[in-house]
Structures are given as structure tokens and as C-alpha cells.
Image (cartoon, rainbow, N blue to C red):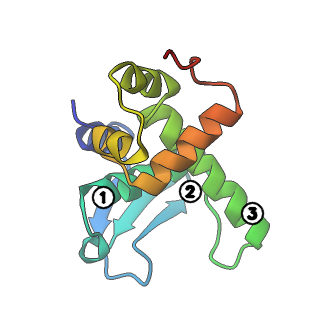
Amino acid sequence: MRVIEKIFEEYEKNGIALGYANLDAIAATVEYEGSYAVAVDYLKIKNMPDMVYYLGHELSHCRTGATHKLDSPFELKIKNEFKANKYFALNYMPPESFNKAFGMGLRETFELAEWFCMPEWFVAKTWEYYSDNGLLAPAKD
């Protein structure tokens, strides 16, 4: 199953509403009394890796409860963005998948981004996090 299909399945399974809105941002999550909705301005999304990232990232805000008001302190926003990105990475680009890709000879960020169907910057950030935290198998040369 492709990653985008898994993301849509998780939206449906968890009863998270997903829809289009003309937004200043690319996407936004709304929480009201324990229920979630995600609005996406699809016209601002350039390619499939970006679509995967934004849909998965907003889904991750819902799954972790890491939401905040627009006027929340900057520190809370950063904390919630980190939680959402971490959840998304661990569930859709887990360390085992990196190890599998490495075993297939994929070593460049652009190769991994293609393989995962994720933006290069997010693959690089996730790879760095996993490396820094000892979550990847040692490289075999």
C-alpha cells in the first residue's frame, strides 16, 4: 500500500474530517471537543511528496493531540510541530524503512525522498534525527 493510501485510511479509521479550504497556510488542523478536522488548500501543493507531507503532518497533529491556538506562544507551537513531525516520521518513515532502503543501496537524500515519496528536506531531517538518536543500523560497506 502506498503511503498516501495509508494516510487516507488513517483519516477515515479515526473519523478525522478532511476537506478543502482557501487558506493563508497550506493546511490547518482544527480540534473541537475531542474531534478533529483538517483543511488543506490543495492549490498551494506543488507535488505528490508535498501532498503526502502536509496530509500526514496534519494527521499527526490529530493523532498526538498536538494542537494550539493561532496566538499560542512560539515555544508551544514549536513543541507541537516537533511532536507532529516525530509521529509522522516514526509511523510513515520508521527507522526500519531507512535500514531497508540502505540495504537496497539507497544512500542519497534525493533517492530516499523518491523511495519514501516524501520531500527531501523532511527525509534529511528525519535521517538526522534517527542518526543522532542511534535508531539506525550501522552502515555496512
Mark number, residue 39: none
Query: Callout 2 environment at 10 Å: few (<14), some (14 to 19), or many (20+)?
Result: few
61 up-or-down from 135: above or below: below
Whole-Å distance between the Cαs marked 1 and 3? 25 Å
Query: Callout 1, which amino acid?
Result: Met
According to the picture, the residue beneath numbered tag 2 turns out to be 33
- Please tell me in which quadrant of the rendered image residue 41 appears: bottom left
Whether residue 58 is visible to the viewer of this picture, yes or no, is no
Q: Secondary structure at mark 3?
A: helix
Query: Callout 1 environment at 10 Å: few (<14), some (14 to 19), or many (20+)?
Result: many
72 up-or-down from 22: above or below: above
Residue toward you, 2 or 9: 2
Whole-Å distance between the Cαs marked 3 and 2? 20 Å
According to the picture, the residue beneath numbered tag 1 turns out to be 51
Query: Callout 3, which amino acid?
Result: Leu
According to the picture, the residue beneath numbered tag 3 turns out to be 76
Query: Callout 3 environment at 10 Å: few (<14), some (14 to 19), or many (20+)?
Result: some
Whole-Å distance between the Cαs marked 2 and 1? 27 Å
Dot 3 or dot 2, earlier in sequence: 2
Dot 2 or dot 1, earlier in sequence: 2
Q: Secondary structure at mark 2?
A: loop
